[in-house]
Image (tube, rainbow, N blue to C red):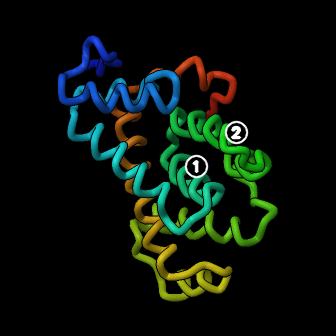
Amino acid sequence: MPTFPVLTLDTSPADSKPMLEQTQQAFSFIPNLIGVMASSPAITEAYLSIASIFSKSGLSPTEQQVVLLTASHFNDCRYCMAAHTAISSMQNIDMSIVQAIRDDLPIADAKLQALRQFTRLVVENRAWLADSDVQTFLDAGYEQSHVLDILVGVAQKTLSNYTNHLAKTPLDEAFSTVAWQAAK
């Protein structure tokens, strides 16, 4: 089985170095996911660009984390579940929301639960949804633009979740206290 190395500033291709430096400045370290992605400057740039774009979407930081955690939970991405739990904590997001997603329990806030359910439907059905599914989401207080914003978050998580599955990305020490495994 091929192994995917976790590259560093010293071992990455020249085209990846500026993106690794940017990541290190943002997080004070280079997460293993980005180190793995660094083998391909294209995926590194795509992932970081989509993440930046999603952060500017019409969804709040809490709503963004609901989307990212929900997609990661559905895709059983242990790395991203831990990473986004830690990021949520850094963003001062109500950890009861994060814990509900981690434990596959309903979120107490009805609007956030509607976002979670809709995101799951999008991922599970590859966005082949009934009009009534979209209307239920809109009736919860969201707008059509939010439907499309969710697709940006799902694209971001598709890149990272699939990278982690292929590479078996080792969990960073910084995320180890919030390691996650799906309940069986």
Left or right: residue 66 compared with residue 4: right
Q: Tell me the SS state at disc 2.
A: helix
Q: Quadrant of the C terminus?
A: top right
Vertical arrangement, residue 104 with respect to residue 13, above or below:
below
Front-lying residue, 35 or 108: 35
Quadrant hosting residue 11: top left
x, y percent for residue 125: 44, 67
Quadrant hosting residue 37: top left
How many numbered circles are shown?
2
Q: Are marks 1 and 2 in contact (CB under 8 Å)?
A: no
x, y percent for residue 91: 66, 44
Residue extending furthest toward the left: 14
Left or right: residue 174 compared with residue 57: right
Q: Residues within 10 Å of mark 2 (few under 14, many from 20)?
A: few
Residue at 54% x, 64% y: name it.
119
Left or right: residue 131 compared with residue 11: right
Q: Earlier in the sequence, mark 1 or mark 2?
A: 1
Q: Which residue is mark 2?
A: 89
Q: Which residue is mark 1?
A: 69
User: What is the CA distance from the residue labelled 1 to the residue labelled 2?
Assistant: 13 Å
Amino acid on which disc 1 is placed = Leu
Label 1 vs label 2, nearer the camera = 2
